Amino acid sequence: MGHARRVGPILAHDFASTVLRVSDHDRAKDRAEHADLVRLPAPLTPILTAELDGAAENLRVPVEAILLAALGRMFARTIGDGVVVVDLPGQDRSVPLACSPPDKTSATQMLAETRQTLTDAPVEPQTVRRVSEVGFSYGRALPASEHALELLAYRGGGVLQLDWRYDPERFNPYTVEEFSEQFPLALIELTSEAVPQPDKRRPERRRRRTGFAPVIRIDGNGTDPAITGEPSEEQLK
């Protein structure tokens, strides 16, 4: 691995790029429609799970978007710079996932773009949705499909469980093992280097400045102070 394996231009989405080939081998033409996928469990450690949840809260980015961004960064580490179309079967849609290295796309930008991609991607009827090589799901079961690679993320045992499932006819085992090893490193890079962005939905309230300080007056008997809006002598000079 380590070099970009490009195939034809993307058809499911309207943007100028090419799709990276993820699998090692082509699918046999005479094989069954749904292959028996091999499962490779690779749960996050408790520390990394806590860091992920803390980053989601601090950065105000959904966990699903962070995991997808880490997937894109992982593909950039192992395959190359480009785009991978990822199916989200639980949501009946596919998203173009940018796979960019840190020197091209910062962690903050990577998270922002992935979150925007999730927001903008339309729901696609099953009859027209094109199946890509990769499927991803967070907290939802993945139905049987033709994916060469699937990543299922879910909570269990106090940590985030990650199940890598792959077609053994299209992947060498060591390729998926490398994916599983590089993914946590990509996740650490994103969660540790990204910085919170202003929430455009909640504009900051500016304090109204009057231009002068209130003056406290005391009446003749020295009681009952009253605050007026008159400028002080200092401010009138």
Image: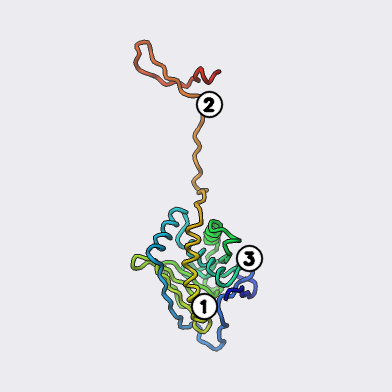
Q: Which residue is mark 2?
A: 211
Numbered circle sitting on residue 175: 1
Q: Position of residue 34 (x, y in %)?
A: 48, 82
Viewed as shown, does residue 15 lie left or right of 166?
right
Q: Amino acid at mark 3?
A: Asp
Q: CA distance from mark 2 to mark 3?
A: 53 Å
Q: CA distance from mark 2 to mark 1?
A: 66 Å
- Asked whether 206 or 123 is in front, the reply is 206
Disc nearer the start of the sequence (3/1): 3
Number of residues whose C-alpha sits closer than 10 Å to that of mark 1, classed few (under 14), some (14–19) or many (20 or more): some
Disc nearer the start of the sequence (2/3): 3
Look at discs 3 and 1 and give the one toward the viewer: 1
Q: Which residue is mark 3?
A: 14
- Asked whether 113 or 202 is in front, the reply is 113
Q: Position of residue 139 (x, y in %)?
A: 41, 67
Q: Amino acid at mark 2?
A: Gly
Number of residues whose C-alpha sits closer than 10 Å to that of mark 2, classed few (under 14), some (14–19) or many (20 or more): few
